[in-house]
């Protein structure tokens, strides 16, 4: 038992290593074509132990819907009523879930719904038909077809390619024999035959078109035609068609049945003085219609007895003078009628001796005329003359502006399919009828008389708004007209939309505008924005009718999208034209932020650079003090007595001979007599301290070990040039305290030498005047020059 388990495990491992398709396993037949709705079987050769299962287009087939047979060598899948166009079938191992093999099943259909017809090549010739045409339905368009014709006395076939119709000439066809037609569809992979269709020649014969004659009798059209060779057959059906040549009117079509050997003859009542087009067609019973006969055009004659003016009027409200305009209208006599026609209108008041207007006859055009009346009731008369003789006369009542007159109530209107339905409630008084008039713009009127309390208005302009008025008619008078609410002949789709898109890298802002709404455009309920990539699915966003923009999110960067907007109303929907936009590669707002930040940083850097440059320039442009006006001083030690004067005040150069400036040439002369007070033997300069008179006894006793004599600050200065060590003389004046008469006050001060500190020697300091603007300062008594001395640590 163990060796068997080991062998089984090794087989599974080897199977998994080899991949999804195991060598030696396969499914057959390979890529078969089967007829739609047929049954088939697919075999899977078993090469691994265990059960197998099937998948169709990656979906596992339910075993209850299929018949799977497992034996030792093969697994068989039975498919019944297979109707898919194509499907991928795969056989899998149930133990290791690996594909053992697969095949693709494709389906085809056979030609169906074959219809054939015998007809004539020349419509003027009679006799046997010369052509035979068949059509059929088939879903494949790249297919070779062959039509097979078979009858007791003849058989033939005809081959065509890639079309589902075939026309072939026929010779010596026997009309009393039924024949059979079959169509074969063939490709490189499959071949299919249609079901055989049997035809009766007389039921598929398309006879030649009739030859007609048209004449006019009074106001009637007389139409005649010959039934040609169909005389020998039984009853045939025919249709006659006539319509006016002017305008786009619907033709009048009537059906006629002719008995055996009977020719066609009909009479149709028409309007006088109009041109009509007439044609006829016929067919055998259950056979196709023939072609329409050649059209005949005739002009109907003018008949005086058929003239009906059908006079009506509309009345405006009185103006400030009480005058009303009456717009009279009637059915005109066609201009195609021979002779001269004259129309005259006269308004006549019902009360005699009416003043205010001159009631004379008015010559009018052939269909309308305007006259003016006052607020009283009138009668308007229309008289028509033909070649100076009276042809017809009619009159209409115009009620007074004031007074109570009967009128209809509860007028209701509705529109459907371009036809407006109008209904109302009759007045209490008995009426002889109702006059309905309607207008589009108040200039052109249409009217119709009816005895019912409802009517339908036809031939209206599409998507236009009409005003409708209903007026009751009495024996010799009229009631007051009642106007219905404005109604559109048809509510159209919403107006056209123009969209614009502003795209970012992963979003887009879409906005749109609609054209100025027409009066009969449907009210938009909502808008829907459709967008998609070139190969992706269609997405949509819905917004209500009050919004005109939407923000699209989660778009792919650097991708082209197509977009259109659909406006939906209760009557339908309209779409904008399709447009395209492409999202950005990166967010332009980030670039804007970086640009702004970079600009700010650049401005800051430039500003700092300019500030530094200005400060450097100012520093470089600081005036170097004149050495003749500067002094050298010795730094005081931290233990120096407080309150002592830190420097000697400058002497006014103009008042002291010693305050002169020593130039470089003067320094080069060591034996110069001006260098008095210079001690070359001394290694260090002596330090002189000057005491101020304001020192307290505490300050004087801070360092009792040192013998220090303080003196008040004096303006006297030694004018000797200082030279540290054995260096050359410098141009700076010494701060040694010497007995120099005070030029300002005449007071004298004595300098007391103090022993130099052994730890720190004297240091010379170069001080500029601009450095004295900060820190503690002392002002000398002799001038306003300020010097600050800072002792280094």
Image (cartoon, rainbow, N blue to C red):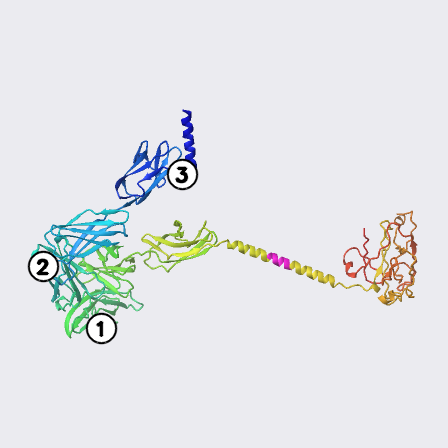
Residue where numbered disc 2 is placed: 229
Mark 2 neighbour class, 10 Å CA radius: few under 14, some 14 to 19, many 20 or more: few
Helix, strand or loop status at disc 1: strand
Residue where numbered disc 3 is placed: 20
The question of residue 602 being in magenta is answered with: yes
Q: Is residue 289 visible?
A: no
Residue 400, x across and y down, in percent: 24, 64
Q: CA distance from mark 3 to mark 1?
A: 103 Å
- Residue 633 horizontal side relative to residue 497, left or right: right
Residue 191, x across and y down, in percent: 25, 47
Quarter where residue 614 is shown: bottom right
Residue 2, x across and y down, in percent: 42, 25
The question of residue 103 being in magenta is answered with: no
Q: Nearer the viewer, mark 3 or mark 1?
A: 3
Q: Nearer the viewer, mark 3 or mark 2?
A: 3
Between discs 2 and 1, the one toward the N terminus: 2
- Residue 573 horizontal side relative to residue 560, left or right: left
Q: Is residue 251 visible?
A: yes
Q: CA distance from mark 2 to mark 1?
A: 62 Å
Residue 238, x across and y down, in percent: 13, 57
Helix, strand or loop status at disc 2: helix
Mark 3 neighbour class, 10 Å CA radius: few under 14, some 14 to 19, many 20 or more: some
Between discs 3 and 2, the one toward the N terminus: 3
The label on residue 362 is: 1
Above or below, 300 against 684 in this view is below
Pointers 2 and 1 in contact (C-beta within 8 Å) = no
Magenta-tinted stretch: 600-606
Q: Nearer the viewer, mark 2 or mark 1?
A: 2
């Amino acid at each position: 038992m163990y060796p068997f388990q080991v062998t089984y495990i090794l087989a599974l491992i080897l199977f998994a290593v080899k991949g999804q398709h195991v060598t030696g396993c396969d499914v057959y037949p390979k890529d078969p074509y089967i007829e739609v709705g047929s049954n088939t079987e697919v075999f899977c050769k078993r090469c691994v132990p265990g059960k197998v299962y099937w998948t169709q287009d990656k979906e596992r087939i339910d075993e209850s819907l299929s018949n799977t047979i497992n034996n030792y060598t093969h697994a068989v899948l039975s498919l019944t009523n297979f109707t898919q166009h194509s499907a991928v079938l795969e056989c899998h191992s149930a133990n290791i879930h690996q594909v053992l093999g697969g095949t693709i099943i494709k389906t085809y259909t056979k030609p169906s719904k074959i219809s054939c017809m015998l007809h004539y090549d020349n419509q003027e010739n009679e006799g046997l038909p010369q052509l035979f045409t068949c059509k059929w339905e088939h879903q494949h368009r790249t297919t070779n077809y062959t039509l097979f014709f078979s009858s007791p006395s003849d058989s033939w076939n005809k081959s065509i390619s890639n079309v589902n119709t075939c026309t072939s000439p026929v010779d010596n066809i026997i009309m009393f024999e039924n024949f059979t037609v079959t169509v074969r569809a063939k490709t490189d992979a499959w071949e299919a035959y249609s079901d055989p269709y049997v035809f009766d020649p007389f039921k598929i014969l398309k006879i030649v078109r009739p030859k007609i004659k048209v004449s006019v009798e009074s106001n009637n059209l007389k139409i005649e035609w010959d039934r040609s060779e169909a005389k020998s057959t039984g009853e045939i059906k025919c249709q006659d068609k006539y319509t006016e040549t002017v305008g786009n009117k619907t033709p009048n079509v009537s059906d006629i049945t002719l008995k055996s050997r009977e020719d066609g003859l009909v009479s149709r009542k028409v309007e006088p003085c109009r041109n009509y087009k007439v044609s006829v067609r016929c067919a055998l019973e259950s056979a196709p219609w023939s072609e329409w006969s050649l059209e005949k055009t005739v002009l109907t004659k003018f008949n005086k007895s058929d003239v009906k003016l059908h006079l009506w009027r509309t009345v405006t409200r009185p103006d400030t003078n009480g005058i009303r305009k009456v717009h009279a209208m009637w059915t005109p006599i066609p201009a195609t009628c021979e002779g001269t026609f004259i129309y005259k209108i006269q308004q006549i008041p019902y009360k005699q001796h009416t003043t205010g207007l001159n009631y004379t006859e008015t010559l009018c055009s052939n269909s309308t005329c305007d006259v003016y009346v006052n607020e009283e009731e009138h009668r308007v008369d229309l008289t028509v003359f033909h070649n100076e003789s009276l042809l017809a006369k009619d009159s209409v009542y115009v009620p007074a502006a004031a007074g109570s007159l009967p009128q209809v109530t509860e007028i209701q209107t509705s529109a459907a399919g371009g036809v407006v339905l109008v209904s109302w409630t009759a007045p209490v008084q008995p009426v002889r009828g109702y006059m309905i008039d309607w207008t589009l713009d108040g200039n052109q009127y249409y009217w119709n008389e009816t005895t019912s309390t409802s009517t339908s208005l036809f031939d209206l302009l599409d998507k236009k708004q009409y005003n409708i008025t209903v007026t009751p008619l009495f024996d010799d008078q009229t009631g007051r007209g009642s106007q219905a609410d404005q109604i559109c002949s048809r509510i159209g789709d919403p107006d056209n939309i123009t969209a614009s898109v502003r795209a970012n890298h992963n979003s887009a802002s879409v906005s749109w505008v609609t054209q100025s709404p027409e009066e009969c455009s449907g009210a938009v309920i909502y808008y829907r924005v459709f967008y998609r990539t070139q190969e992706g699915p269609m997405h949509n966003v819905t917004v209500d009718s009050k919004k005109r923009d939407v923000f699209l999110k989660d778009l792919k960067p650097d991708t082209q999208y197509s977009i259109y907007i659909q406006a939906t109303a209760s009557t339908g929907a309209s779409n904008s034209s399709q447009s395209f936009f492409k999202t950005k590669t990166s967010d332009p707002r980030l670039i804007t932020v970086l640009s702004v930040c970079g600009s700010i940083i650049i401005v800051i850097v430039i500003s700092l650079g300019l500030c530094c440059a200005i400060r450097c320039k100012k520093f470089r442009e600081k005036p170097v003090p004149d050495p003749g006006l500067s002094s050298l001083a010795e730094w005081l030690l931290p233990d120096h007595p407080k309150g002592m004067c830190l420097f000697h005040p400058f002497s006014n150069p103009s008042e002291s001979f010693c305050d002169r400036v020593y130039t470089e040439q003067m320094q080069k002369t060591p034996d110069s007599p001006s260098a008095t007070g210079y001690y070359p033997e001394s290694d260090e300069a002596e330090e002189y301290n000057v005491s101020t008179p304001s020192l307290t006894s505490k300050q004087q006793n801070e360092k009792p070990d040192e013998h220090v004599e303080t003196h008040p600050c004096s303006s006297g200065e030694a004018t000797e040039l200082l030279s540290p060590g054995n260096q050359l003389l410098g141009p700076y004046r010494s701060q040694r305290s010497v007995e120099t008469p005070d030029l300002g006050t005449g007071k004298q001060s004595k300098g007391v030498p103090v022993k130099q500190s052994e730890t720190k020697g004297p240091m010379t300091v170069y001080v500029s005047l601009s450095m004295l603007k900060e820190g503690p300062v002392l002002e000398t008594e002799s001038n306003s020059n300020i010097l600050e001395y800072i002792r280094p640590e």
